[in-house]
Image: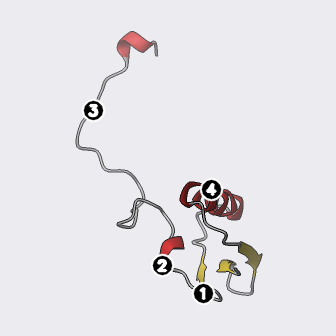
Amino acid sequence: MTKETMKIEKGISMPYSAIADGTRYPFKKMDIGDSFLIPENMQPGAVRYSCYQFIHREQKNWKFSVRKTHEGHRCWRIK
């Protein structure tokens, strides 16, 4: 398929839902010690990178940790 034959389509929603503040994850709402379970269809590394982007974009002095638990991978706000 060449650039000239690519069809632009309107009204097709994205396959994930973003929360109201424009991020996929609830980082802004988290207090120290809070965590969320990462859905099985998402890569833990992608969540780690999103944490990094959030901290730099928001200029926060926060820290997050992603660890594997018996339930699956989980992300905590640790600072």
**Residue type, numbered disc 1:** Asp
Q: Secondary structure at mark 2?
A: helix
Find the distance from the CA under tag 4 to the CA under tag 3: 33 Å
Say which label, 2 or 3, has the lower sequence index. Answer: 3
**Residue type, numbered disc 3:** Glu
Badge 4 vs badge 3, beta-carbon distance below 8 Å = no
**Image quadrant assignment for residue 31:** bottom right
**Image quadrant assignment for residue 16:** bottom left
- Tell me the tag on residue 34: 1
Q: Residue at x 39, y 67 (%)?
A: 19
Q: Mark 4 — residue?
A: 56
Say which label, 2 or 1, has the lower sequence index. Answer: 2
The x, y position of residue 29, in whole percent, is 48, 79
Badge 2 vs badge 1, beta-carbon distance below 8 Å = yes
Find the distance from the CA under tag 1 to the CA under tag 4: 20 Å
Local packing at callout 1 (Cα closer than 10 Å; few below 14, some 14-19, many 20+) is few
Q: Mark 3 — residue?
A: 9
Say which label, 1 or 4, has the lower sequence index. Answer: 1
**Image quadrant assignment for residue 62:** bottom right
Q: Quadrant of the C terminus?
A: bottom right
Q: Mark 2 — residue?
A: 29
Find the distance from the CA under tag 2 to the CA under tag 3: 34 Å
The x, y position of residue 55, in whole percent, is 62, 62
